[in-house]
Image: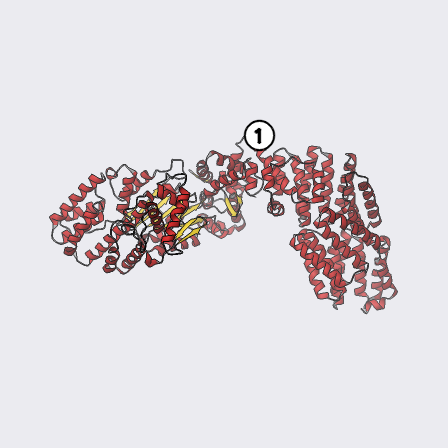
Amino acid sequence: MLGPLAVAGDPITAGRDRIVLAMMLLHPDRVLTAAELIDAVWDEQPPSTARGQLQTCVSRLRRALPSGVISTDPAGYRFALAPDELDAAVFGRLVAQARERRDPDLYRRALELWRAPALVEIDSQAVRRAAAVLDEQRAVAIEDWVDLALSAGHDRDLVGELSGLVEQFPLRERLRGQLMVALARAGRQADALAEYRRARAALREELGIEPGRALRELHKQILAGEPPEERAEMIRCLPRTVGDFTGREAAVRRLLGVVEAAGPHEPALAVIDGMAGSGKTTLALHVASLVGDQFPDAHLFVDLHGHSDREPLDPAVALLLLLRQLGIDADRVPPALDERIDLWRNELARRRVLAVLDNAASTRQIAELLPAAPGSLALVTSRRRLSGLDSVHNESLSVFTEDEALAMLARIAGERVGLEPEAAAEVVQRCGGLPLALRLAGARLAHRPRWQVADLVRRIGTSALPELAAEDRTVAGAFALSYGQLAAPAQRLFRLLGLHPAPRFDVLAVAAIDDLSTADAEDLIDDLVDVHLLEEPAPGVFRFHDLLREYATALAAELPEAERTAGLVRALDLALHAAVATSVNARRSALIRDLGRPEPLRPDLLAALTGPDERLERERPALAGYVDAAFAADRPDYGWMLPRAAWHFLWSRGYTDDIETLLARALLATRQTGDRRAEGVVANYLASAHYRHTRYQAARPLLERSIRLLHEVGDPISAANAMCNLAIVFYQVGRLTESVELCERALVVLANQDEGVSPGLCLDALSYSLAALGRYDYALRMQRRRFLLSALTGDRNAVLHSLMHLTVIRQRAGRIAPAVAERNYRTLLRWGIRLPYRALVSDVTSELAVVLLDQGRSGEAMAELRRSFALFRDMGDRRLVPWILNLMGRITRESGDPAGAAELHRRAFDRAAAVPQPIEQGRALLGLGDCLAADDPAGAAANWREARDIFERLQVPERAEAERRLGDPVAVGGR
């Protein structure tokens, strides 16, 4: 490579093959895409057959080169050689060793590898650009070697060799200066001054510029007869750093590691990106201040205006500013970009510089500004994620952690922050941890010494952006600069997403709200993520920073009302259909009947709605926001349809509080629309939350109103379902006979319908009450019928629930072996956990405890009861709490702790009495009597009699248990 391209072995003569091989050699161990290679071969004007011709080239190269040297990667091709098989790699290694050891012999060995300019005969613009880097490294190595020789006092010996080098590199000012130093030290002052005149003439003729400041200073020294010095004083152009720099310890360590890894042998490059106000420039300047001593020649800074109210700097203008910072007069800077690039590289070749390129707009803007000389550092900041740079460290800044944010606030605002920790935490939360917002909030406190932190919290309120301002610095202004750089479609999407009800959204949600194809949505999302106006906390899931959401919402308010409403309705439509998709088969049919067949979703979005359960789980925290959005869009119909569609998912997973919140709002929505049928449907499902919370007195009037409304509007099917739910409430409060009658009436209603509606719910409710009454045969028939219907309709959850109840009824009736019942329950648990079906898991866990207890495995039974109790608590389901407490009491008494058991039974009685759940009151009294039997027979008998009276009134089989105890209290007390 260090001269004409030459390969050991068979020669490679085809021009295109040599270009492809040269590109691979210039980028070893990096995947080169087909597009890069095609551009190199045809100089960006490829024929239509370019890809096929490229493959032919690669095939020929593989035949000519050892096996495995060229490998195929999904993204393109990779070229791999051992380090000693490539002369450029050997050169780089020798130069690095020479610099480290300051060894002139190693420099000579490295330079002797060169036969001519790198890849001199390859006719390709891309190859020439890349080879120019090697040529530059050669020239710098020559100059470094000369420095060592001059330092060793070989001035006279170097004059001849330096003269030849200057002829070879006539425009390299550092070499000219080294020759002038050698001549002056050899006592040839006139020749040194003549060399300066020749250098000036060459630069003016070839580049139209004057010599640089260093060469001019050297000329002055020789004219004055002073000992020649090669280095000018340090150039310092960095802005001042903040005195209260806070946080970012990990980022600082990583950036310092980049500088350390590069050392004096390689140029170092780091790009710091992040959203507006994340502290990119502050971090870059802080790191620059820590490592500045390692770059003794120049500290440069240029604001590239990538995101400002001005046009981004053209690279030519940026180069002019940087060259001026190096001391080059404006009239010496050539007008053409290519000439400025050459001058920039020439000036940097002999310097170790640190350059901060702030606020970059794109890779193209900075590509030619990056110092390439070994031992230099470029720190680039940008709101955009810059790609296409080689050998770069990317540091993406997120917001501060809470600790970092509080520390910054305290450093700016003082001790008030520590005295009001809760208020300070609220300020941090409202600022979203954004450094600029925190700095402005802290400044407001610092300039208002009479304010407490709580005063600032009140000022921020629910709208923080107007308060986060100081003179001409505002968070909203910083956001506006990023927003202003977007194309019109991305701006429109950003505004519409400010309306989105969910805090997180995926590509489908984005496509829906802006009526885009998913492909277009992905492209626009990429635009927003690239400039940090959106975050991607998980693959395919996007969100706003809180302050950016506030900004986007404010922009959305400027859209025409019709456009805002249309976007919200599209978002609601997707959410509704996604919720509908979580119900299948018979449940889907019942749901569609309740909803009245909502408008169809766009076919492409419907086809892409995969994994509806996972989607609804992710969106569950946002469901209340969707309902609010429905009211905002003046579409209260969505305000009740969405909660109804999500109900079964929420119920099966135990999200009882969500059901109550959403269905209560849904009920308001139905009343706002005046849709009495919808009100009846929603009232039925709202009652389910009260049922789980054991607020039966609240559930009953809702269900009775539901039944009445649904009968009045001519919907007997929905009315029958509400009747079954009322029957379940009757079952819980001990009105078992009424529960059976209500179920049987509902079954008659459903049997008279032409739609073939499944009576599964009624059969299930009926079997509950029949089993409680001890009518086990009838109960089993109803539950088996329910099981068959559920299996026929493919309702998996109902099948599992029915299997559980069949086992429970057989267990109560003594018609199943405990080991078989245990096996059934453990199988059901595995299914419930896998689905997941938390409501089933909680019920089955408590029933498994009974089976274990009947087998004398009290320790295992207690563990299952505790697990069940925790599950019910997490779901907000209080129905079985008294029952579980009574079972715990039985285990505790049988373990020899009657006092502890009595306390558990008293708790069970109090909980059951508050509901009321009379059957559990009776069981608690039965257990209390058992605890007292040994020491207080009279007290025991009083409890048993009270329990017997309750059981007799309920007409349940437990009456026999009370009678047995009253007939033989001694046997009970001795157990």
Q: Secondary structure at mark 1?
A: helix
| Residue 819 placement (x, y as % from top left) | 75, 63
Amino acid type at circle 1 is: Ala
Q: Quadrant of residue 104?
A: bottom left
From this view, report whether residue 748 is shown above or below residue 938: above
Q: Is residue 170 visible?
A: yes
The residue positioned 77% from the left and 64% from the top of the image is 854
Question: 136 and 647: which one is in front?
Answer: 136
- Relative to residue 818, is residue 235 drawn left or right? left
- Relative to residue 451, is residue 206 drawn left or right? left
| Residue 204 placement (x, y as % from top left) | 20, 39
Question: 474 and 797: which one is in front?
Answer: 797
Q: How is the image coloured?
A: secondary structure
The residue positioned 87% from the left and 66% from the top of the image is 968
The residue positioned 17% from the left and 57% from the top of the image is 154
- Relative to residue 384, is residue 687 drawn left or right? right
- Relative to residue 163, is residue 515 drawn left or right? right
Q: Quadrant of residue 359?
A: top left
| Residue 534 placement (x, y as % from top left) | 50, 42
Numbered disc total: 1
Farthest-out residue, right: 967
Q: Quadrant of residue 772?
A: bottom right
Q: Is residue 264 visible?
A: no
| Residue 842 placement (x, y as % from top left) | 70, 55
Question: 599 and 460: which one is in front?
Answer: 599
Q: Which residue is mark 1?
A: 562
Quadrant for the C terminus in the image: bottom right
Packing grade of label 1 (10 A; few <14, some 14-19, many >=20) is few
